[in-house]
Amino acid sequence: MAFLLFFFLSLLSFASSATRDHPKTFIVRVQNDAKPSIFTTHKHWYESSLSSLLSPSTPTQVLHVYDTVFHGFSAKLTPTEALKLQTLPHVVAVIPEQVRRLHTTRSPHFLGLKTTDTAGLLKESDFGSDLVIGVIDTGIWPERQSFNDRDLGPVPSKWKGQCVATKDFTSGVCNRKLIGARFFCNGYEATNGKMNETSEFRSPRDSDGHGTHTASIAAGRYVFPASTLGYAKGVAAGMAPKARLAAYKVCWNAGCFDSDILAAFDAAVADGVDVISLSVGGVVVPYHLDAIAIGAFSAADMGIFVSASAGNGGPGGLTVTNVAPWVATVGAGTIDRDFPAEVKLGNGKVLPGVSIYNGPGLTPGRMYPLVYAGTGDGDGYSSSLCLEGSLDPEFVKGKIVVCDRGINSRAAKGEVVKKAGGIGMILANGAFDGEGLVADCHVLPATAVGAANGDEIRGYIDSASKSKSPATATIVFHGTRLGVQPAPVVASFSARGPNPETPEILKPDMIAPGLNILAAWPDKVSPSGVSSDNRKTEFNILSGTSMACPHVSGLAALLKAAHPEWSPAAIKSALMTTAYTVDNRGETIIDESNGNTSTVMDFGSGHVHPTKAMDPGLVYDITTMDYIDFLCNSNYTINNIKVLTRKTADCSGAKRAGHVGNLNYPSFSAVFQQYGRHNMSTHLIRRVTNVGDPNSVYKVRINPPSGTVVTVEPEQLVFRRVGQKLNFLVRVQTMAVKLHPGGTSTKSGSISWSDGKHNVTSPLTVTMQQPL
């Protein structure tokens, strides 16, 4: 239903835009069985082919040619020209470009990866030394110590990539650690015009910081001492400290453009990466129209693990992105470290907050006048958010100012307050943000508080204004606190399920550390990112599913090094079935936004547990043909499937797989449309491969969702050898529940197989939907 609606809306949009006929970028998929002389040498051929369609006044420009993960090219066309192109016999599809956005030291220790272990994932994988992680992001700052190549062996012989040299990125900055660096900007410039090279680098060099940060999370070397403005002091290290890195810069000041992202996938696969890490995303569209899903499919088909961030649209439901089943979709959790900065009010109340600030502080013991920005003169909405130019200096001078979160960046609000003469800032969450807090590097004494405490502070200011004692406050900074409980917690911003494209595939797949993560940072970017901040730092603390994704990318490299025979699906299965859902208090992981118990829709299979993932016992493997059956059963056309897979699919055998939910995925999701029925049932078939011990017997343990009856046949799996595959069937029976039209109800449970040594656990959700 969602697919048909999207397709219908796309046609309407395409038709209406055709009347305006403004040029935009399209990605064009061509037949792969055309003669190589035409299609492999081919930029000039594509351009001459296009020129026959375009008006003589239109310059023909092919932006990128793709020949590894995709056969075709991208070009700037009017919608009318795109429609004409689609009529050519060798053109399979014409896909409108989408613009994506970034999903912006203690975590290895928190994950149980310790250099002192004599055995374990780091030791078994030699820290990932022969594996290459490709990071598709904003580029890299190569001079950082996190990317030094001390004691690394020669560049792996399989490597075919290159270090693209420019005036600000010489070939000498690459080494045995950073073995490749490229940039892709044709799509960006086709839409935005020639880039301003005074504000960003036309090279692989990072002018944002995001790509440097994510690359060092995945594979940064050990660096000591490491800290940000004195916070989070200790050793900085990535997940796979000896893995090699290749940086593919696709994100620029105006975003990350699909045509450039697909070119990066094409290059990374041809170069010989083992893992691709992608911390960007956009709106969810059908897989054959999604450049990331298209690139990731071919990468996975060639044995490359692809991990992507789930998005920062939480805590609302249906916000998860990058949902293709051949991608590891990673949400964000907290670690057991925070940076407390309390608000002390004039009425004696002390309210918790978080901050990273080391500049001139507030005088200890002194209370300062406290005001809410939204009650000053001027536009109440703009001033409440502390937008640029919205604050009256007369109102805020010498005071601590309460600003609401939203619209502009959190650190930028502090710059606005400072410019207007304010002495400090309290950043208050709105109702949507809930209680989730992110520590930022501020340019003045500032702290962030949750929605409830924000309401309390505003209430105190309001009541004080009606009395004879004006509101006062101060901010007390407590530095770095370790051993925090509870941890992990699902970060408030982490995007949530259900999967908007395929509800039968649970997403996100897992969570990993993504809140207040310390990692490498460029010289030319201040820690706060605001224009007036001239500070420099070798490391910075950032939050986002962007930070969670490279944790999993690095772990995947370690697992691939320890188990070279494992497929990308087997690696993902190992990470998912060994993940945990209990925090360091022994209770179910909670949701930061409201303090309630989290669900499968928040954390997927749970929080990654690397040491257990090295020895999962059983894995749920998936072949390319399994994915094609899945697409057939998802009602994708033969043409749609060819766009994604580069293969001509035969859907006649797909029904043997049963239905969409029978993809051999490491989690289970049964979706029922009620349609007035009272009793409903379905079955889910799975196939597990023994990667543990020969002669092992696994017994099933079922935790059924409430209101359901779940049976598994057989209840025991007897393996005689390593590599043996056995099938089992899960039958789910349930009864209709009372729902309003369009309503949904989801209950969760689990299915676990155990041989006494390994516990192979998968979440099981049952969703009831009442049609409109």
Image: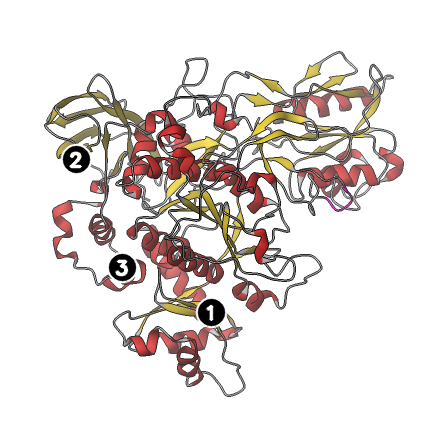
- Spatial CA distance of label 3 from label 1 is 27 Å
N-term-proximal mark, 2 vs 1: 1
Which numbered disc, 2 or 3, marks the residue that appears first in the sequence? 3
Q: Is residue 94 above or below residue 651?
A: below
What is the magenta segment's predominant secondary structure? loop
* Left or right of 674 on screen, residue 434: right
Residue on which the image places disc 1? 16
**Quadrant housing the C terminus:** top left
Q: Residue furthest right?
A: 394
Q: Which residue is mark 2?
A: 723
Out of 407 and 607, give the one closest to the viewer: 607
Residue at x 21% of width, y 48% of height: 626
Q: Give amino acid for label 1.
A: Ser
- Residue 207 location, x and y as percent? 64, 51
Tell me the SS state at disc 2.
loop
Give the residue number, with chain letter if any, for mark 3: 641
| x then y, percent, for residue 418 | 81, 37
Determine crowd level at label 2: few under 14, some 14-19, many 20+ residues with C-alpha closer than 10 A: some
Q: Viewer-proximal residue, 219 or 617?
A: 219
Q: Residue visible at 14% across and 23% down?
A: 696
Q: Amino acid at mark 2?
A: Gly
x, y percent for residue 334: 51, 27
Residue 722 is labelled as: none
From which residue to which does the magenta span run? 530-534
Question: In the image, residue 752 lies at what x, y percent?
Answer: 24, 24
* Closer to viewer: mark 3 or mark 1: 3
